[in-house]
Amino acid sequence: MRVLVADKFEQSGLDALTAAGCEVIFEPDASGDTLVAAIKKSQAPVLVVRSTPVTEAMMDAGALSLIVRAGAGVNTIDVAAASKRGIYVSNCPGKNSVAVAELTMGLILALDRRIPDNVAELRAGNWNKKEYSKAKGLMGQTLGLLGFGHIGREVAQRARAFGMPVVVWSRRFANDAASRQAVQDEFGIEVVGSPEELMRRSDIVSIHLALTKDTRGFVNGALLKHAKTGAYIINTARAEVMDYAALAEAIKAKSIRVGLDVFDNEPTAATAAFVDTLCANPAVFGTHHIGASTNQAQEAIALETVRIIRTFKETGKVPNVVNLAKLTPATHMLVVRHRDKPGVLAHVFEYLRVAHLNVQETENIIFDGAQAAVARINLDGAPSARALDAMQSGNADILDLQLVKLG
């Protein structure tokens, strides 16, 4: 199997793909038109990317069957276009969680002790212990987590070690009291009822929301109005979940201090000029979108990427798929108990074709001894009784038919 890797990738991962019998084409600088050309030239069924955007034009350029995001988010991939073309999109959730959580705690500490300002003064030849002795300290400060996925959980564990009470808001707990109680018991945290309540109660707010249509611009002016005066706000998630203009206003109005790893319109290249008014604000400490960029995280992501591709190569199945339908249009299931002989299912499918019924899902389970099987075929409609009778009588190897209404 040919694999096109169009981004930075660990050498250990490249070696493991080769050892798994893959032909690896490594083009870490390919993007835009050059990636379209690489996909067309290689005709690789598998594409691996990190932050490189994958567009509809790229999917039409070659013979892709699987796109692997060597990371967690898939917002740089046109998932809808992939779904239309039957291309799997897979990712590596949770593999960079510890790295992002560590940076989150680093930004919190940096804000509280003003570590970057300390370093800048020392490098400028100034000693200013009087100024930099002022700090709140973290013990007893309430940390609010907006979102509680893999990364939020890792942050909660580290915050508890610092003696910080932790409160959490996540939409997933809104109508699931059992999950809410289980999380509270496991992590020693409190789940609150709304993001506004979380803002009002938190001395430090850390954002860990996945980017969806519902979370785009989620942290806006209306929500920031509920923040405490002098609160710290951390964003190591996605720039798009925060209204940065509203954040700039909150910094002025409420003396909020901010730690950011993601920015509006940040460069996609590894090195580039970047001017942003927030970066120049003394109340803001920023890093260069490096949350997942530790050796440990990249090795873990490479290992997971190899596992995904090897599983696809050896079984045809894809772990961590993000674009399979959770609910199909199927309304009925046709259960066919039959002798395990060639042509039986072809006979059934021909009748379904004539009836203009679409097969949404199907499975064929073989009984011990491989003499008989049962097929379960999900359909977007119901065959007529007459069609079912003709289907069964037309093939002696069909032992029984049953039509089940779904839902």
Image: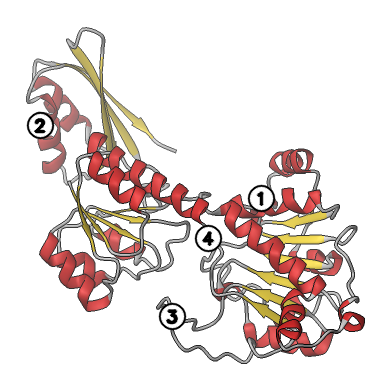
Helix, strand, or loop for circle 3?
Answer: loop
Q: Which residue is mark 3?
A: 271
Q: Which quadrant of the figure has residue 314?
A: top left
First in residue order: circle 1 vs circle 2: 1
Q: Which quadrant of the figure has residue 126?
A: bottom right
Q: Which quadrant of the figure has residue 59?
A: bottom left
Residue reaching furthest to the top: 369
Mark 3 and mark 1: span between their CA atoms?
A: 29 Å
Residue drawn at the location 87% of the way across and 62% of the way down: 141
Mark 2 and mark 4: span between their CA atoms?
A: 49 Å
Residue 104: percent from the left, percent from the top?
67, 63
Mark 1 Cα-neighbour bin, 10 Å: few <14, some 14–19, many ≥20: some
Q: Nearer the viewer, residue 344 or 237?
A: 237
Mark 3 Cα-neighbour bin, 10 Å: few <14, some 14–19, many ≥20: few
**Horizontal arrangement in the rendering, residue 246 relative to residue 131 (left or right):** left
Residue 113: percent from the left, percent from the top?
81, 72
Q: Which residue is mark 1?
A: 154
Q: Three-letter amino acid code at disc 4?
A: Ala
On residue 292, which mark appears?
4
First in residue order: circle 2 vs circle 4: 4
Helix, strand, or loop for circle 2?
Answer: helix
Q: Nearer the viewer, mark 2 or mark 4?
A: 4
Q: Nearer the viewer, mark 1 or mark 4?
A: 4
Q: Three-letter amino acid code at disc 3?
A: Thr
Q: Nearer the viewer, mark 1 or mark 2?
A: 1
Helix, strand, or loop for circle 4?
Answer: loop
First in residue order: circle 1 vs circle 4: 1
| Label 1 close to label 4 by CB (< 8 Å) | no
Q: Which residue is mark 2?
A: 346
Q: Three-letter amino acid code at disc 2?
A: Ala
Mark 1 and mark 2: span between their CA atoms?
A: 51 Å
